[in-house]
Image (cartoon, helix red, strand yellow):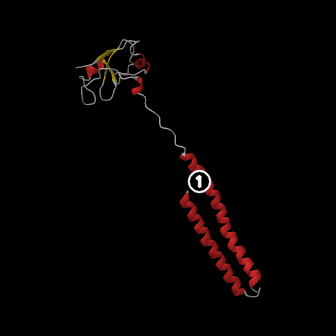
Amino acid sequence: MINKHQLHHKKYKSFLRENRQDPITGDTIQENDTVVICAVCKSAFLEDSWSYMNGQHCNQSSTLKKIPKENALIIKQEKTKPKKANKQKNTERNEKYRSISLSLAVILPIGFYVFCMVNYFKPTDTGFLMTGVFLTAGISGVLIMFVDYFFKNIT
């Protein structure tokens, strides 16, 4: 049995406000039109379009006895997630800490080397001088790699 609905302005005011179009003809569904509502997808068809499709849509022939209320057809929008904004702030903060840590990874070993050379070694000991330079460069390099790896993994 086909359930047809004659669209009267008073009874179907909210449905008419939706300005639906017939999916077959593209015509806007208006007051006093006779429509058929597919029971599966809730699409509204003019009576002639439903007849044109041999009374079937969505691989079935069931129609709705009542036109669905407007609130049943509203699609709720998802709320935006504030995590994206926080992630950007965290990335900026981590980049600042990374640059400070990289600077300290270079300055601290060099400062320690200069302190040791001034207080413990004689200026004539060039072997100690070269060993200190290479150790300082190695320690700085290892610290730079560690800091860089650490901050890349937390962002």
Q: Where does label 1 land, which residue?
A: 91
Q: Quadrant of residue 57?
A: top left
The tally of labels here is 1
Q: Secondary structure at mark 1?
A: helix
Vertical order, 62 against 98 (above or below): above
- The residue that appears at 68% across and 65% down in the rendered structure is 103
Residue 32 image point, x, y percent: 36, 11
The answer to whether 57 appears left or right of 93 in the picture is: left
- The residue that appears at 40% across and 19% down in the rendered structure is 15
Q: Quadrant of the N terminus?
A: top left
- Judge by depth and name the residue closer to the eye, 141 or 96: 96
Dot 1 amino acid type: Thr
- Judge by depth and name the residue closer to the eye, 26 or 74: 74
Residue 54 image point, x, y percent: 23, 23
- The residue that appears at 64% across and 79% down in the rendered structure is 135
Residue 140 image point, x, y percent: 64, 72
- Judge by depth and name the residue closer to the eye, 117 or 46: 117
The answer to whether 71 appears left or right of 89 in the picture is: left
Q: Quadrant of residue 154?
A: bottom right
Vertical order, 100 against 59 (above or below): below
Label 1: how many Cα within 10 Å (few below 14, some 14–19, many 20+): some
